[in-house]
Image (spheres, rainbow, N blue to C red):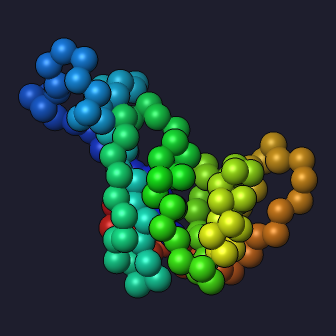
Amino acid sequence: MIDTSIVRVHQQAACIGRNRRQSMGRSRGGLTSKIQAVVDGNGLPVRLALSPGEAHDVQLAGKLLSRRKSGSMLLADSGYDADWIRELATKKGTWANIPPKSNRSDLICFSPYLYRARNRVRPLL
């Protein structure tokens, strides 16, 4: 399971100059960071990553999903609905159960029943 949560950055934690290593970005609410987490079936974190708040969810998905085990299932929200993520999951021997975006033209196999298990990642973030 993979998911993202946005966290507001404290005013005094703002970086000096243009230091991008601190993963802070501007959004409508001010300085924010995104915490992206991959968890196992029990809800325990496997991999964590930080990105600037304005970055799209899929930017770090390749790095986070690079160590997937064969035979596992990838549960993610529709923000991760990209062809290259599905191809990466297939190459790793996993099945991607991601709901299709509303603008997707081709049909994708998706199980709403299995998707309910994704709620285990939300309490972590």
The vertical placement of 111 against 36, above or below, is: below
Quadrant hosting residue 73: bottom right
**Place of residue 80 in the rendered image (x, y in percent of width and height, measured from the top left):** 61, 52
Quadrant hosting residue 89: bottom right
Q: Residue furthest top?
A: 17
Looking at the rendered image, the quarter that the C terminus falls into is bottom left
Quadrant hosting residue 21: top left
Side (left or right) of 95 relative to 9 = right
Q: Residue furthest right?
A: 106
Q: Residue at the location (61% across, 49% down)? A: 79
Side (left or right) of 51 relative to 88 = left
Q: Residue at the location (39% across, 26% down)? A: 27
Q: How many tags in the picture?
A: 0
**Place of residue 47 in the rendered image (x, y in percent of width and height, measured from the top left):** 36, 64
Side (left or right) of 26 relative to 109 = left
Q: Residue at the location (65% across, 55% down)? A: 85
**Place of residue 69 in the rendered image (x, y in percent of width and height, measured from the top left):** 53, 77
Q: Residue furthest left?
A: 12
The vertical placement of 15 against 91, above or below, is: above
**Place of residue 17 in the rendered image (x, y in percent of width and height, measured from the top left):** 19, 15
Q: Residue at the location (83% across, 62% down)? A: 108
One can see residue 22 in this view:
yes
One can see residue 97 in this view:
no
